[in-house]
Amino acid sequence: MPLSLFLSHLIGGAIGSSVTLSLVIILGTFILEDPTTVIVGVLAADGAIGVPIALFSLYAGIILGDIGLYCLGWLASTHPRLGRYVDHEFVAPFRAWLESRYVLTVFTARFIPGSRLPTYTASGFFRSPLSTFVLTAIVATSIWTTILFSTSYWFGNLTSTWIGSVRWGVALLFLLLLFFTGRHNLLARRARKNGLNTDADTREH
């Protein structure tokens, strides 16, 4: 059974108890963040979940997950073998790069698939200011999650009469499109950056 389908059944089975439903949604964001948001948005459009509890649970779960990644990086930095790399010259260029554009990097990581884990754990590992991290993560989450939830809610209203398998199949395709679009943008951004660095090195020589 696909994990997204499992989440759909898990969240659907919790409908009826607000506390249980909220906890299940929060748990779902820990497992698969964007699919959980899409599922909750569609179920909210069906009237199965209230919009306030849906958004509150999504925001809470995603922010807690982000803080968890930060704490994971921080814990890694306390390990005797890993901690020596916090101020090591080997990672100094990356640390300097992160610190010089910290807020922007944390903010954009929310919108680029695959970049959140390394960026947020690196924030904790290098012990970047937690307050700045949390505030930036909250702003980014409020924008991205609201957009994704609203789009899913609209999709749920549009497809309310569709057969379930077709409806969720289209939703899955939408998620895949988001993933590959984000991945393409990330690779293109890295390619441009590498090209600029190569040009700079060429001019220096």
Image: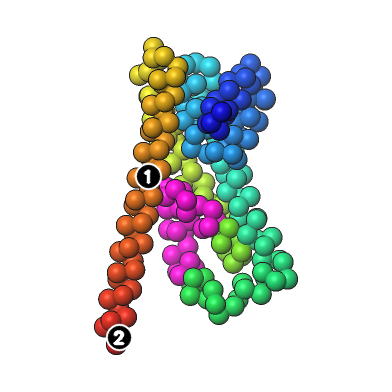
Q: Quadrant where the C terminus lies? A: bottom left
The majority secondary structure of the magenta stretch comes to helix
Q: Position of residue 127 (x, y in %)?
A: 61, 65
Residue located beneath label 2 in the image:
204
Tell me, yes or no, whether the highlighted magenta stretch contains residue 20: no
Image position of 92 with respect to 49: above or below: below
Image position of 64 with respect to 77: above or below: above
Amino acid marked by disc 2: Glu
Which of the two discs, 1 and 2, sits closer to the camera?
1
Q: Position of residue 43 (x, y in %)?
A: 50, 21
What is the secondary structure assignment of the residue under circle 1? helix
For the point 38% across and 40% down, which residue is it? 178
Tell me, yes or no, whether the highlighted magenta stretch contains residue 110: yes
For the point 53% across and 27% down, which residue is it? 5
For the point 60% across and 40% down, which residue is it? 30
Amino acid marked by disc 1: Phe
Image position of 80 with respect to 166: above or below: below
Span highlighted in magenta in the image = 97-120
For the point 45% across and 59% down, which residue is it? 105
> Quick one: label 1, few (<14), some, or many (20+) residues within 10 Å?
few
Looking at the image, tell me whether mark 1 or mark 2 is earlier in sequence order.
1
**How far separated are the C-alphas under marks 1 and 2?**
36 Å
What is the secondary structure assignment of the residue under circle 2? helix
Residue located beneath label 1 in the image:
180
